[in-house]
Image (cartoon, grey):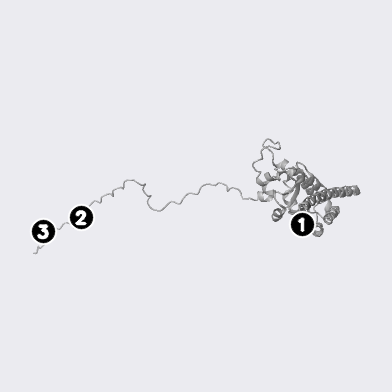
Amino acid sequence: MAVIRNLVSLLLVSMSYQAVTSASTLIRRGKDHDGGKGHDKSKDFSSSCGSTIASVSMNPDIQTCSNFVDLFPIHGAKKDFSKAIKEWISGVCAVQACTDQALAKAKDELSDGCKDELANDSPDAGALFSIFSFYKKIRTDSCQDTDKLDFCQPELLDSVENLKATNRTFFTISAEAYCEDCKKSVGGKSGGKPSKRSEKKSADVCSGSSLDKVSVTVGLPDLKAKSDAPGPKPKGPKPEAPKPDGPKPEAPGAKPKDPKPKVPESESDSQGPESDPGDIGTKE
């Protein structure tokens, strides 16, 4: 069974490689008629890189733990690309993790055999390299809530260069699959009015023709960043304002109260006890 599985894996790798190289050849031929103007080097795919990818996929230390065989339905999907990615992630999470040594070896082989493709931001080589680079993050962040992953967030549709700068895994899918999944009408039927979350760049991707022959790159959503985002502060009892010392200030417009008049002291009280006139100046 192991031999048959390896042969099937090799066949899938060969089919994927042939599809990529055939498309690249047609692109180069079209550009040659224009004198080579505007040639996109990211579309070039060498036989060396194809052989390297086949070698990495056949490595038993990588083949199972990376669920390599389920990467091909993602690349070839005509619709439900997000379902294909989630199934691949579920397969990765269901088996024993790749070792650090196996991941490092896979990245080293790709860096050597696909160095031109990686330098020119090739979508296919770059996507595979990103999977091995952020493999641990996939298992840590995406395994628990795989069903909650939303690949139609507009900011996830971007160029290889920009997605690399976000330090995340990304995938190469057909524009047809992206538009089928992410440009659905409110009623759930494709081809209708784009949903509110579709922005200009996704609209531009879906406005062309022959979308099945066009590839786009989509990043892996970051669920952890959303769960760690600070939420609204809980409402507590409103603290009482400190009461000011002294008399309570009067309301504006209130009539001032007249002070209570002081009762004057009587003259008798102010002069002290009354003297007996008979006692004054009397001598015997």
The residue under label 3 is: 278
Lateral position of residue 274 relative to residue 115, left or right:
left
The residue under label 2 is: 269
Q: In this picture, is 88 found above or below 117? A: above
- Could you tell me which secondary element the residue under label 1 belongs to? helix
CA distance for labels 3 and 1:
133 Å
Nearest the eye: 73 or 275:
73
Is the C-beta separation of discs 2 and 1 under 8 Å?
no
Q: Amino acid at mark 3?
A: Gly
Closer to the N terminus: mark 3 or mark 1? 1
Numbered disc in front, either 3 or 2: 2
Quadrant containing the C terminus in the rendered view:
bottom left
Nearest the eye: 256 or 272:
256
- Could you tell me which secondary element the residue under label 3 belongs to? helix
Numbered disc in front, either 2 or 1: 1
**Residue 235: numbered disc:** none
**Residue 118: numbered disc:** 1
Visible residue check, residue 146: yes
CA distance for labels 3 and 2:
22 Å
Q: Position of residue 264 (x, y in %)?
A: 22, 52
Closer to the N terminus: mark 3 or mark 2? 2
Q: Position of residue 63 (x, y in %)?
A: 84, 51
Lateral position of residue 232 relative to residue 53, left or right:
left
Q: Amino acid at mark 1?
A: Leu
CA distance for labels 2 and 1:
113 Å
Q: Position of residue 100 (x, y in %)?
A: 79, 58
Nearest the eye: 11 or 99:
11
Numbered disc in front, either 3 or 1: 1
- Could you tell me which secondary element the residue under label 2 belongs to? helix
Q: Amino acid at mark 2?
A: Asp
